[in-house]
């Protein structure tokens, strides 16, 4: 908050789960997750990051 970020409770919970499970958050608003120190990517960036040949999978959380 001191850096000018005011994350909501939902973003904090999502970030916490992602950090605990070593996940990348895919969102259209990556700025919401910068202050949490987790990896976040846009859907367009995720297409470039996803490597199924390395056993990676994507889970959709709505």
Image: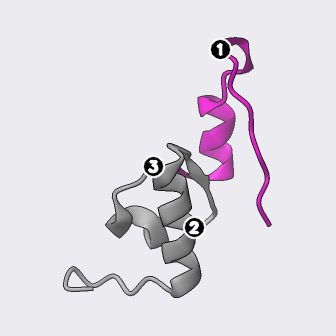
Q: Is 46 displayed left or right of 21 in the figure?
A: right
Q: Secondary structure at mark 3?
A: loop
Q: Read off the residue under disc 3.
A: 39
Residue sitting at 63 percent across and 64 percent down? 28
Mark 2 and mark 3 in contact? Answer it, CB < 8 Å: no
Q: Read off the residue under disc 2.
A: 14
Residue 24 lies, with reference to residue 15, above or below; the image says above
Q: Position of residue 38 (x, y in %)?
A: 41, 54
Residue sitting at 54 percent across and 54 percent down? 18
Residue closest to the eye, 19 or 46: 19
Q: CA distance from mark 1 to mark 2?
A: 25 Å
Residue 22 numbered tag: none
Q: Position of residue 57 (x, y in %)?
A: 74, 32
Q: Secondary structure at mark 2?
A: helix
Q: What range of the chain is rendered magenta?
A: 39-62
Q: Earlier in the sequence, mark 1 or mark 2?
A: 2
4 in the magenta segment = no
Q: Position of residue 53 (x, y in %)?
A: 72, 12
Q: Is 36 displayed left or right of 39 in the figure?
A: left
Q: CA distance from mark 2 to mark 3?
A: 12 Å
Residue 15 lies, with reference to residue 59, above or below; the image says below
**Quadrant of the image containing the C terminus:** bottom right
Residue 54 numbered tag: 1
Check disc 3: other Cα within 10 Å, few if <14, some if 14-19, many if 20+: some
Q: Secondary structure at mark 1?
A: helix
């Amino acid at each position: 908050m001191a850096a000018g970020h005011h994350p909501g409770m939902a973003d904090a919970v999502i970030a916490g789960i992602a950090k605990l499970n070593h996940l990348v958050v895919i969102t259209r608003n990556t700025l919401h997750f910068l202050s949490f120190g987790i990896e976040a990517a846009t859907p367009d960036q995720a297409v470039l990051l996803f490597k199924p040949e390395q056993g990676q999978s994507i889970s959709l959380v709505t």
